[in-house]
Image: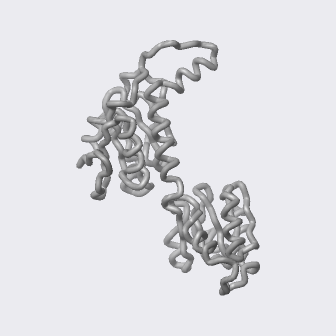
Amino acid sequence: MSSGFRLAARLGSTQTLSVAGDETRILLLEGIHETAVESLAAAGYHNVERLTHSLTGSDLLGAIADVDLIGIRSRTHIDDAVLAAANKLKAIGCFCIGTNQVDLDSARRLGIPVFNAPFSNTRSVAELAIADIILLMRGIPEKSARAHRGEWAKTARNAYEVRGKCLGIVGYGRIGSQLGILAEGLGMRVLYYDIEHKLPLGNAAPVNRLDELFAEADVVSLHVPETPVTRNIIDADAMKAMRPGALLINAAQSTSSRSNPSPTKKRSSRPFASSTT
């Protein structure tokens, strides 16, 4: 839940609202957690509609026409046309880290503030990336598929411990830095690359260029926002620069990687396997 809604909950229902709570219509999309409805009710806002799915096209245009506040995650796209149809909209709450699903320029021009929740999934994504690393290092996806076909591949070939391996993190922000701490706890050596100077946590070490990271890392994990700089940051040339048998974890926006190598390629390929978190 975004900090704005937490603030509203802390204010309590005894506070005087500039607009009566029941007159403020709020639409929550994409299965935003029920605690958001409870927090809004505690703050005096009871006219809340919560949907478990996203809306697009005419459905979204119709739904947003009389809404004062809308809460979305990453699948609902609010562009200039949607904002033009939002006759009463006062604010947009993005219950996620990014805001690229909202036309920020149009929202700014119309005076509609956009809020996000930058810490909402930090730990979850970091833990999932660790899980991906261990599963791919051990070759679990392939072994699981073979077991489901009735094959029992009792072999340690292409199965490795993560201890002693090098993790290269591209994007050392909230998630990337958390991932580095978890990886060190498993005995991994951590390198990171970021376009901004970032203070390392633990024993993580920065590198100045991506190719330096690719040359060292047994695992490359992406944690960057979608910007013109990061779009297709992992292309065919980047993959060729990676170590033979390296793993690629894409926990960033989908456009950060231009190509997704097949996890069924031989260990000597570049990279051996990939995963999108």
Count the marks: how many? 0
The image shows residue 49, relative to residue 127, as above or below, that is below
The one nearer the camera, 237 or 113, is 113
The image shows residue 177, relative to residue 37, as above or below, that is above
Residue 60, x across and y down, in percent: 69, 64
Res. 159 image quadrant:
top left
Residue 127, x across and y down, in percent: 49, 43
The image shows residue 234, relative to residue 92, as above or below, that is above
Residue 271, x across and y down, in percent: 39, 30
Residue 217, x across and y down, in percent: 31, 36
Position of the N terminus, as image quadrant, is: bottom right
Residue at left 44%, top 16%?
Answer: 156
Q: Would residue 24 appear left or right of 144 to someone viewing this image?
A: right
The one nearer the camera, 142 or 182, is 182
Res. 47 image quadrant:
bottom right
- Whether residue 130 can be seen here: yes
The image shows residue 116, relative to residue 7, as above or below, that is above
- Whether residue 262 can be seen here: no
Query: What colouring style does the render use?
Result: one colour
Q: Would residue 47 appear left or right of 187 to someone viewing this image?
A: right
